[in-house]
Amino acid sequence: MEKKVWIGLIVVLLIVIIMIFNGNRASEEINELSINEVCFGDDCFNVEIADTNDDRARGLMFRESLCDSCGMLFIYDKPGDRKFWMKNTLIPLDIIWLDSDYKVIYIANAVPCVTEECRLYGPEMDSNYILEINSGISSEIGLEIGSELGWVYSQ
């Protein structure tokens, strides 16, 4: 009986060690790949990442301002038909859809909406990434379909 108890304890200890190691490794990978900036050529934006369902659902709702070099980058694991609305979003935005190769496939000038009937924005093709920045900036920097997004990783 005593031998079974020791074997059980060793198994539990090994499981705990494996869980700790995997948790630390995942944390390190996330920190290594945290994105601080995304750029179109020399025009860069400090972005908040929205990569969970909760973050993507909240987006930039209820914000009263967004700095000129700031934005929010929505990241999805797989390509999909992604439509956005501006419900409870108080600032006008340029919403930029990108494919899996980080190329712009659609740009919308989206206006705030505080009613129950808000317009949907989005392309008729699949996207993996969506970038929201202040309205008008995409045309100021000459952004167009096919422009490519570059990534700057944190150190």
Image (spheres, rainbow, N blue to C red):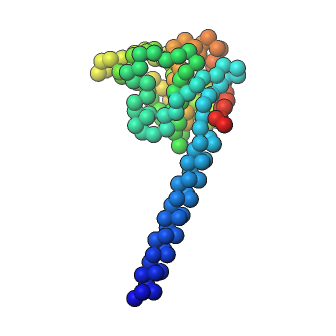
Confirm whether residue 68 shows in the render.
yes
Farthest residue in the bottom direction?
1
Residue 115 x %, y %:
30, 18
Position of residue 109 relative to residue 17, above or below, is above
Q: Residue at x 40, y 30 (%)?
A: 58
Confirm whether residue 126 shows in the render.
no
Q: Residue at x 59, y 53 (%)?
A: 25
Which of the two residues, 74 or 146, is positioned nearer the viewer here?
74
Q: Is residue 66 left or right of residue 141?
A: left
Q: Residue at x 32, y 17 (%)?
A: 114
- Location of residue 127 by image quarter: top right
Residue 135 x %, y %:
51, 14
- Location of residue 104 by image quarter: top right
Residue 106 x %, y %:
56, 24
State the quadrant of the N terminus: bottom left
Which of the two residues, 139 or 7, is positioned nearer the viewer here?
7
Q: Residue at x 56, y 59 (%)?
A: 21
Position of residue 5 relative to residue 151, above or below, is below
Farthest residue in the left direction?
116
Residue 13 x %, y %:
49, 70
State the quadrant of the C terminus: top right
